[in-house]
Image (tube, rainbow, N blue to C red):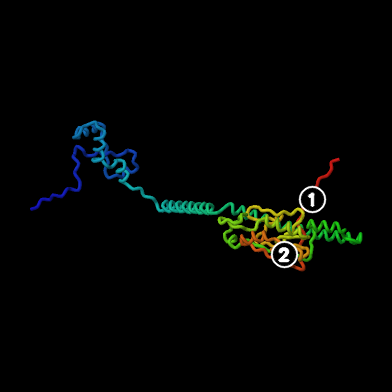
């Protein structure tokens, strides 16, 4: 017969080292416990006398508690009787937890949506809509001013027999306060295709790191050349140039007065079409056309027998007065 040499499942605890079980007097289910007892005050000395190891070493006492008393007596008391909840309390708790989860999920989705949204985009859209409204109001007011001027001219003609003097007509023509029609030329130019695809702009020519596009300085130069060669009225993309109209760059756009224009640019000039076409062609401006070609810009000049330009948007003119 072969003896069983396998180790037991657990080593028995000696009687002198058995754990002392105490029941807490404030336990909720102490009456429902199967068995409960408490030691008398004088039992502690008897238990200490039965122990084999008597030492005051804290480390040995800790090891002894971990080996022989791994479970806290209070925890064992709490597992004697389980508290039973009613069905109503259970479902009420579930409903409350579900509502809290829904609220937390909704708040989290709103927070994520707010993080993904760009507040600057909304501001830009608001400003763009305001600018469009202002431009439409300016156009309406300009048309009303032109109508009132035409009515004033008709009344003046009825009273005096002539609408305006030649000097007044010439001044209004130069200032761009009246609509005009006549022969002239149209110059068209646009940004290179590479610039429109990349969306970059630069004023430098002949560089590989940036792309040359049409700038406000180019438009100012072309307009000045047209005025020097006899142009009587000029407009850029339908915006008439007057005495107070500026051509400038603001951000990434070119402004004609307060109106933003984009490529392609169409410059219409009323005057002697042959003289203007000859003065603005490539033979007369070789250096300017060469710089444009190096950047991929190719101006085109065409003659027209009839061009109509509307009046420019003007504001109140202020001038100095003598203080007497």
Q: State the image coordinates of residue 184 (x, y, percent, origin top left).
A: 76, 65
Q: Seen from this angle, which residue lies furthest bottom?
A: 305
- For disc 2, the marked residue is 186
Q: Say which mark, if any, is on residue 25.
A: none
Q: Say which mark, if any, is on residue 317.
A: 1
Name which residue lies at 21% across and 38% down.
17
Q: Nearer the viewer, residue 111 or 266?
A: 266
Q: Is residue 132 visible?
A: no
Q: Seen from this angle, which residue lies furthest left?
A: 1
Q: Nearer the viewer, residue 12 or 290?
A: 290
Q: State the image coordinates of residue 151 (x, y, percent, origin top left).
A: 84, 60
- Mark 1 or mark 2, which is nearer the start of the sequence? 2
Count of marks placed on residues: 2
Q: State the image coordinates of residue 214 (x, y, percent, origin top left).
A: 65, 58
- Relative to 144, 81 lies left or right: left
Assess disc 2: are there few (<14), some (14-19) or many (≥20) residues with their C-alpha within 10 Å of its C-alpha: many
Assess disc 1: are there few (<14), some (14-19) or many (≥20) residues with their C-alpha within 10 Å of its C-alpha: few
Task: Estimate the spatial distance between the alpha carbons at disc 2 and disc 1, rounded to whole Å.
Answer: 30 Å
- Secondary element under disc 2, as helix, strand or loop, is strand
Q: Quadrant of residue 29?
A: top left
Name which residue lies at 75% across and 53% down.
244
């Amino acid at each position: 017969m072969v003896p069983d040499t396998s180790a037991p499942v657990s080593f028995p605890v000696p009687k002198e080292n058995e754990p002392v079980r105490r029941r807490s007097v404030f336990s909720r289910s102490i009456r429902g416990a199967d068995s409960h007892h408490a030691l008398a005050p004088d039992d502690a000395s008897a238990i200490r006398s039965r122990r084999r190891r008597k030492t005051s070493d804290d480390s040995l006492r800790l090891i002894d508690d971990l080996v022989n008393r791994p479970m806290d007596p209070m925890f064992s008391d709490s597992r004697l009787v389980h508290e039973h909840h009613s069905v109503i309390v259970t479902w009420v708790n579930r409903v409350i937890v579900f509502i809290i989860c829904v609220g937390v999920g909704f708040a989290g989705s709103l927070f994520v949506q707010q993080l993904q949204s760009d507040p600057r985009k909304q501001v830009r859209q608001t400003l763009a809509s305001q600018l469009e409204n202002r431009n439409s109001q300016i156009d309406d007011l300009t048309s009303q001013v032109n109508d009132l001027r035409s009515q004033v001219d008709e009344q003046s003609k009825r009273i005096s027999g002539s609408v305006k003097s030649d000097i007044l007509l010439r001044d209004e023509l130069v200032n761009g306060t009246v609509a005009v029609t006549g022969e002239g030329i149209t110059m068209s130019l646009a940004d290179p295709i590479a610039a429109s695809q990349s969306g970059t702009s630069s004023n430098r020519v002949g560089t590989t790191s940036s792309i040359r596009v049409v700038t406000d300085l180019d438009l100012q130069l072309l307009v000045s050349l047209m005025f020097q060669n006899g142009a009587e009225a000029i407009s850029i993309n339908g915006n008439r140039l007057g005495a107070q109209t500026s051509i400038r760059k603001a951000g990434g756009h070119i402004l004609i007065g307060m109106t933003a224009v984009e490529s392609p640019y169409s410059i219409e000039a009323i005057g002697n079409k042959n003289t203007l076409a000859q003065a603005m062609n490539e033979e007369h401006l070789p250096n300017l056309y060469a710089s444009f070609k190096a950047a991929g810009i190719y101006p085109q000049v065409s003659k027209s027998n009839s061009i109509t330009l509307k009046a420019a948007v003007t504001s109140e003119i202020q001038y100095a007065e003598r203080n007497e």
